[in-house]
Structure formats: structure tokens, C-alpha cells
Image: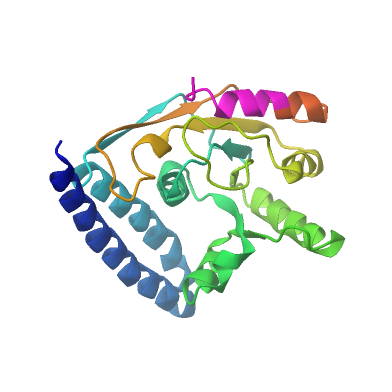
């Protein structure tokens, strides 16, 4: 595909996806006030709208290899672009995602996200904040929902393999949940300002049981989420 065509397709994606997102966020705020039961299907529609735009406007195919358990588990996902963060509500059934606290200050979106059940993560804020985060996570687990974490802490370029953030091992120990590692290679196509056609693959790794020593669980998760970086 020529560069000018890629530019035009990316512009169409930005206009249509983000324009539609504004409408869906407004609808979500109304749902929070009027009927909260409307919020979950609205979030699912947002994920489906994003996938449609990715496929039909950007020319990116999305493939899932493996199966993610439909159970309250801790899902550790490689984070190469905004793609996997936006796609999570479509990929999983009613997920509760650990997200940076700063995102919850976005007008409208933040309030809707809290109501939906996302879990704010405030780094270096002390033991009280950690206890609050764990309490929220356990509430979501009691509801039968999967928890989603990006254990590297931030987006990294495709091919990079930084170590896991220290907080991951603490959450794993305190929540006592099995971990499902998921590799994704979205950075190669989606992360660019001018996005490229191609394929994004999710690769679901072997379930890692709860209760392992820190060094072992970190090594196994790190290897599994970077399985597409070879």
C-alpha cells in the first residue's frame, strides 16, 4: 500500500472511530445516571466499533490463537499500543482492567469507567492506596469477572522486552489467582501515527497457577507475553 493511501485510511480511522467514541462516551454517562445496566452493552459496542474500524478502515486482521478461560483469573497482557487496551472489552467477557489513575480524571469517561468496574492504579501512593486497589480487585473477582493487567506498566515498542513492574508480583501474591499470559504484536501495525495494514495476533499462553515464588511467576509471565517478539 502506498504511503498517501495509508495516510488517508488513518485519517478516516481517526475521524470515524474517535468521533463515534465521543458519542458512545456521552451515551455511557447518560447510562450511568439513567440505567446502569445499559453501560455494559455500550462498552461492548465501543469495542466492536473499534474492531470494525481496524478491519475495514486500516486493513488490519485480528487473530486469536489459544483460548482465554471464562473465569475470574488474572490476565497479563503485553502492551505495545492502545489497540489492546481498547479491544479488551470485546475480547473478554466483562473484564475489570487495572488502569492508570490519571485516566479517571477524563471528564465523563472516568466516572463511567469507575462505574463499569475498572480499577485505578496509583503508583507510589502508599499502603492505603494499595489496600483500596486490592479491595476493588477482590470485589470484581467475587462478581466472577476476569482481571486484566499490563504487567510492563506502560506501552513498549514492538521487539522490546522490559522487565515486569514490581507491583505485578505483589498483586499476584495478594489476589492468589492463576495467571493467563497473553502476547500481542500490535505495535508493528497500530502504534504508528500513520497505521499500517497487516495482522495483529493474540497468543494465549499456558495458565500459570497461583502460589508460585516471585522469581518463577515473573519469569514465566515475561517469557509468555513476549512470545511474539522473536
The quarter of the image holding the N terminus is: top left
Residue furthest toward the right? 127
Q: Is residue 75 visible to the viewer in this orientation of the structure? A: yes
Residue 53, above or below 16: above
Residue 122 at x, y percent in the picture: 70, 61
Q: Is residue 81 left or right of residue 124?
A: left
| Residue 63 part of the magenta-drawn span | no
Residue drawn 83% across and 27% down? 213
Residue 94, above or below 64: below
Residue drawn 73% across and 27% down? 217
Figure disc tally: 0
Q: Nearer the viewer, residue 125 or 120?
A: 125
Residue drawn 80% across and 39% down? 173
Q: Is residue 207 visible to the viewer in this orientation of the structure? A: no
Residue 203, above or below 131: above
Residue 82 at x, y percent in the picture: 44, 50
Residue drawn 75% across and 44% down? 171
- Magenta segment boundaries in residue numbering: 219-230
Residue 220 at x, y percent in the picture: 67, 23
Colouring rule applied to residues: rainbow
Q: Is residue 4 left or right of residue 94?
A: left
Residue 132 at x, y percent in the picture: 77, 62
Which quadrant holds residue 6? top left
Which quadrant holds residue 164? top right
Which quadrant holds residue 54? top left
Q: Nearer the viewer, residue 45 or 77?
A: 77
| Residue 222 part of the magenta-drawn span | yes
Amino acid at each position: 500500500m502506498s504511503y498517501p493511501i495509508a495516510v488517508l485510511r488513518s485519517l478516516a480511522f481517526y475521524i470515524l472511530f474517535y468521533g463515534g467514541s465521543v458519542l458512545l462516551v456521552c451515551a455511557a454517562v447518560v447510562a450511568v445516571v439513567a440505567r446502569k445496566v445499559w453501560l455494559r452493552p455500550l462498552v461492548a459496542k465501543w469495542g466492536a466499533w473499534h474492531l470494525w474500524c481496524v478491519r475495514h478502515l486500516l486493513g488490519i486482521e485480528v487473530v486469536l490463537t489459544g483460548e482465554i478461560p471464562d473465569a475470574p483469573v488474572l490476565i497479563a497482557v503485553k502492551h505495545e499500543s492502545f489497540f489492546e487496551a481498547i479491544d479488551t472489552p470485546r475480547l473478554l467477557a466483562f473484564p475489570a482492567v487495572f488502569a492508570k489513575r490519571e485516566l479517571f480524571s477524563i471528564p465523563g469517561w472516568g466516572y463511567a469507567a469507575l462505574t463499569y468496574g475498572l480499577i485505578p492504579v496509583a503508583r507510589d501512593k502508599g499502603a492505603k492506596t494499595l489496600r483500596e486497589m486490592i479491595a476493588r480487585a477482590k470485589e470484581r473477582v467475587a462478581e466472577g469477572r476476569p482481571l486484566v493487567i499490563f504487567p510492563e506498566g506502560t506501552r513498549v515498542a514492538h521487539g522490546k522486552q522490559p522487565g515486569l513492574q514490581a507491583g505485578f508480583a505483589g498483586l499476584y501474591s495478594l489476589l492468589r489467582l492463576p495467571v493467563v499470559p497473553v502476547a500481542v504484536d500490535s505495535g508493528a501495525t497500530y502504534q504508528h501515527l500513520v497505521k499500517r495494514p497487516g495482522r495483529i495476533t493474540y497468543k494465549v499462553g499456558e495458565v500459570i497457577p497461583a502460589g508460585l515464588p516471585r522469581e518463577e511467576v515473573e519469569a514465566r509471565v515475561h517469557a509468555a507475553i513476549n512470545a511474539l517478539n522473536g
